[in-house]
Amino acid sequence: MSNSYYKCGKIKKKRFFFDFDGTIVTEDILDVVCDIVEKKEESRLINEKVRRGELRGLEPLCDRINFLKGVSYKKINEKLSKETYLRKGTIELFDYLKKNNFIIIDTDDKKRIIKS
């Protein structure tokens, strides 16, 4: 995680960069959700191969997402609401960032910006 500043006109904006999985959550959320269809271990193994560079591109991610074909939003929400996967202090951190007008940017493992 890091923060930095940039100027937007005359106003200085604060940016906060972070990596979602392993930084603000305790477990890969897609693995958790894949447990609904008893594919958690398969999802985890695919993810490990991606991290080791054995698999590349979007296909492994699509494979993991496709495990959830037919699973409703309601079931996913029920699974995720059974316990918190956020690391301690995450809610307070994001409340602080929002209150202090930070621009929050999520990055992937290669530090590419994937959401802001």
Image (cartoon, helix red, strand yellow):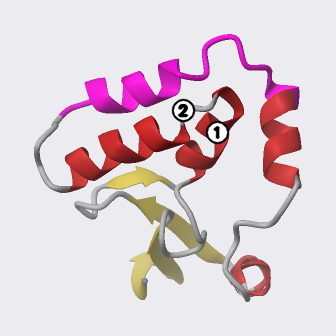
Looking at the image, is 25 positioned above or below residue 65?
below
Q: Position of residue 67 (x, y in %)?
A: 53, 22
Residue 39: image tag: 2
Marks 1 and 2, how far apart in space?
5 Å
Looking at the image, is 98 positioned above or below residue 44?
below
Q: Amino acid at mark 1?
A: Asp
Looking at the image, is 12 positioned above or below residue 8?
below
Image label count:
2
Q: Position of residue 44 (x, y in %)?
A: 42, 47
Q: Secondary structure at mark 1?
A: helix
Q: Position of residue 29 (x, y in %)?
A: 59, 51
Residue appearing at x 88%, y 41% in the figure: 78
Q: Which residues are magenta?
A: 57-74
> On the rendered structure, is 99 left or right of 111?
right
Q: Position of residue 106 (x, y in %)?
A: 47, 61
Which of 50 and 57 lies nearest the eye of the viewer? Answer: 50
> On the rendered structure, is 67 left or right of 75?
left
> On the rendered structure, is 96 left or right of 49?
right
Q: Does the image show residue 9?
A: no
Looking at the image, is 70 positioned above or below residue 100?
above
**Which residue in the protein does label 1 denote?**
35
Q: Secondary structure at mark 2?
A: loop
Residue 62: image tag: none
